[in-house]
Amino acid sequence: MHQVIGGRLLQLHGVSKAYPGVQALAGVDFDAGAGEVHALLGENGAGKSTLMKIVAGSVIPDEGELVLGGEPLPTGSPAACRQRGIGAVYQDLSLVPSMSVGENVLVGRWQRNRGLINVRRTERDAQPFLERIGLKVSPATLVRELGVAERQLVEIAKALSARVRVLLLDEPTSALSDPESRRLFSVIRDLVADGVAVIYVSHRLPEILEIADRITVLRDGMRVGEIPAATATEQQLAHMMVGHEIGEAMAVGQSSAEAVTNGHALVARGLGRPPRLKPVDLTIRAGEIVTVFGLVGAGRTRLARTLFGIEPPTTGELELFGQRIHIRGPADAIRAGVGYVGEDRSVGLVPTMTVSENITLASMNRTSHGPLLGIEAERALAERYVKELNIRTPSVHRRVVTLSGGNQQKVLLARWLCAGARLLILDDPVRGVDVGAKEEVFRLVRDLAAEGVAILYLTSEIREARMLGHRVVVMAGGSIVDDLLPPASEDRIMTAAGGAHV
Ligand SMILES: Nc1ncnc2c1ncn2[C@@H]1O[C@H](COP(=O)(O)OP(=O)(O)OP(=O)(O)O)[C@@H](O)[C@H]1O
Ligand SMILES: [Mg+2]
């Protein structure tokens, strides 16, 4: 319906963008046709988000031209881009936490009564968009009360509420589990059938193969190539992204060769914080990887936050490394040797500090005798982890906000590895991390376990839960509903989690 004679709906020619020390994009050509999903793939820091932001007008390219519907698209004006029909869901969510879900969805288009915002009508008008995406929260809920996955859905509902010709989705499913992602896919298919052009970024390769028509791969800001999704394989895509073969760390059941019989690192009996977290029983042995799977809202994150003392337990008892302990706050957990990577990296990272400072933040007494870390020791330690985790940054002295999303996630992981935690709680730690780096993280998690570190690994992907866990714990409705030894079938896990498996 929006078909453009003689070319695709959206075209980018020779787009370049440099940041200090980084060529984020170098002469990239890209296009998207009405009625198709064009996926954009690449390692962390490859330039995907930069390209999306240029199309949406929020980043000004150094060079290059953009054409929409045969007419030049002005650069650097988000308002003009929105008006021409470009809608975006950003990787780093842009909702206003103090406003309600409904106000956020219809931001800028609120119902007014004599100039005043009619909040109730605005929220009612937002309801259909929430339903369309399958988000079961009241539009009057404040965004700050939602978890990352729910926020992601609100962000999508917001993009859907405007009539768009081009929809940019930057890792829209990174916090979602299978059923929620499927729901999004069906919405995308409807939009595509209506002639919308969708540009889709994700690190989940199976999902790209399912939803995309064409796939373009970026590496170090350059276009590596384009292939039709119909004939592509995961192996081939990973190879194009990374430039070499990867894969053996990604097989199911790698960690489950033998049961772990070490002493207990964690024993929780009836531990909970009702009504948000019902009392749970859970054990983790030293050197054991326990994965926790659950749908959005199942209580995974609440379990993690309770164990780490962010929302301290109000019932039950906890033993860490054989010692009874009362967790009143994160300081107690950290002192007992617990590390925590939360689902929302914006909470853990200190944006104004450097990569190096962020990495060494929890290791104050490992590298120095006093409370202060020697600058040199800090740098050396940080550089070791930057190298080990392959964190892409021109230097460890860069402020952490200038790193790409996946690289920020790796900085958080590095912090706890560096602090020598004996029990690591990882809440979706590879969310938004590219396949190559994911493999590094999995290998690292296994190496740590082999060295005796206990790992509680929370994930929204069944595949990860099965691949990494010595045991797979399933949560639903704020409780642990199943505790499985491998090889736990996907069906069994999904049934326990309460989702219909398609
Ligand atoms: N505002 C900024 N200031 C400095 N450097 C930046 C800025 N934004 C992006 N960069 C750099 O540009 C490069 C490309 O970043 P971009 O966010 O586009 O990557 P990406 O492909 O989206 O990665 P990811 O998969 O991790 O989200 C990275 O090296 C990043 O550090
Ligand atoms: Mg990105």
Image (cartoon, rainbow, N blue to C red):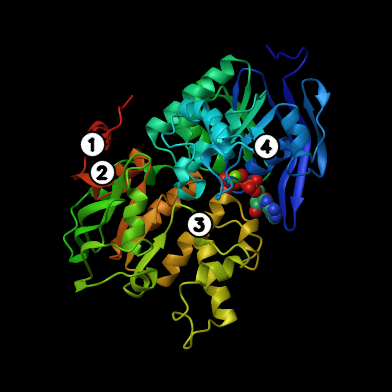
- Decide which of tag 4 and tag 1 comes sooner along the chain: 4
| Image mark for residue 194 | none
Mark 3 residue crowding within 10 angstroms, few (<14) / some (14–19) / many (20+): many
Q: Residue at x 55, y 54 (%)?
A: 407
| Location of residue 339 in the rendering, given as x and y in whole percent from the top left corner | 38, 65
| Mark closest to the chain's N terminus, 2 or 3 | 3
Q: Is mark 4 on a helix, strand or loop?
A: loop
| Amino acid carrying mark 2 in the image | Val
Q: Name the residue carrying label 3.
A: 410
Say which label, 3 or 4, has the lower sequence index. Answer: 4
Name the side, left or right, on which 497 lies relative to 331.
left
- Whether residue 333 appears in this view of the structure is yes
Dot 1 amino acid type: Ala
Look at the numbered disc 2 and give the secondary structure of its residue. strand
User: Would you identify the image quadrant in which residue 73 lies?
Assistant: top right
Q: What element carries label 3?
A: helix
Tell me: 206 left or right of 170: left
User: Residue tagged by mark 2?
Assistant: 474
Label 1 close to label 2 by CB (< 8 Å): yes
The residue where tag 1 is placed is 496
